[in-house]
Amino acid sequence: MQFILVTMIDIKKALNKLLRDLEDSSPNLKNALQEIGPITFLLNINGHKNIYIIINGDDSDISFKEKNYAFEIRASLIDVIKVLVSGKLSRNLIHGDAEIAIVLLGIIYKSNIDIIYLIDKYFGSLPALFTYAIVNRMFSSSEIYEDKNHRKLRKRLRDIAIRLDRLEALRSS
């Protein structure tokens, strides 16, 4: 019980772990964040406490205590979810240095984060499998490969990639 309380209270450690996992699941996210870092911003969600976030490698921090920030994202919870799903940040939600905010979101959106890997790591292989099946069904490619061998090869490569992700998650657990 004491371990759970310490983990819940130490959100800085949790943020750093989440950032490391995001960097592990994306081939270029770490380098891109290092190029523009440190980044400080305020996430002001209507009806919630202000969240101050600093992204600076292993010294990243998240806090409810007031800190200096480069930009503020002022939005409702629905607006934040829309941004996460669409990857498009409306300028009217940004107050302060909008250029840094747009660059940060662009880096995150274009970093090809392996969501299936993260779901597998945090929630297990069954939810990851369901998510993979749903994503494949919803976003199935409109490209039709005429060559039967080409289709089989692509399917085998996808299966191998999933297995490798699961092995990495098991090994790091």
Image: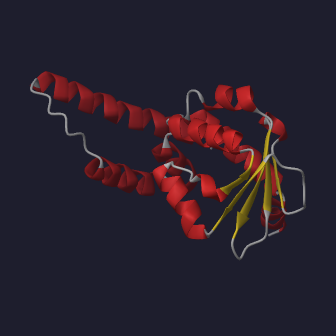
Its colouring scheme is secondary structure
Q: Residue at x 64, y 58 (%)?
A: 93
Q: Residue at x 9, y 26 (%)?
A: 146
x and y percentages locating residue 84 in the rendered image? 53, 54
Q: Nearer the viewer, residue 157 or 134?
A: 134
Residue 150 is drawn in which quadrant? top left
Q: Nearer the viewer, residue 13 or 68?
A: 68
Q: Nearer the viewer, residue 104 or 54?
A: 104
Is 8 left, or right, of 141 in this rendering?
right
Q: In the image as oriented, which residue stretches furthest toward the front? A: 92
Q: Nearer the viewer, residue 98 or 116?
A: 98
Q: Does residue 43 sit above or below 54 in this rendering?
A: below
The quarter in which the C terminus is drawn is: top right
x and y percentages locating residue 49 in the rendered image? 78, 70
Residue 148 is drawn in which quadrant? top left
Q: In the image as oriented, which residue stretches furthest toward the bottom? A: 47
Q: Residue at x 47, y 40 (%)?
A: 166
Q: Mark yes or no: residue 154 visible.
A: yes
x and y percentages locating residue 91 in the rendered image? 61, 52
x and y percentages locating residue 20 in the rendered image? 68, 39
Q: Mark yes or no: residue 171 visible.
A: no
Q: How many marks?
A: 0
Is 66 left, or right, of 169 in this rendering?
right
The quarter in which the N terminus is drawn is: bottom right
Is 140 left, or right, of 63 in this rendering?
left
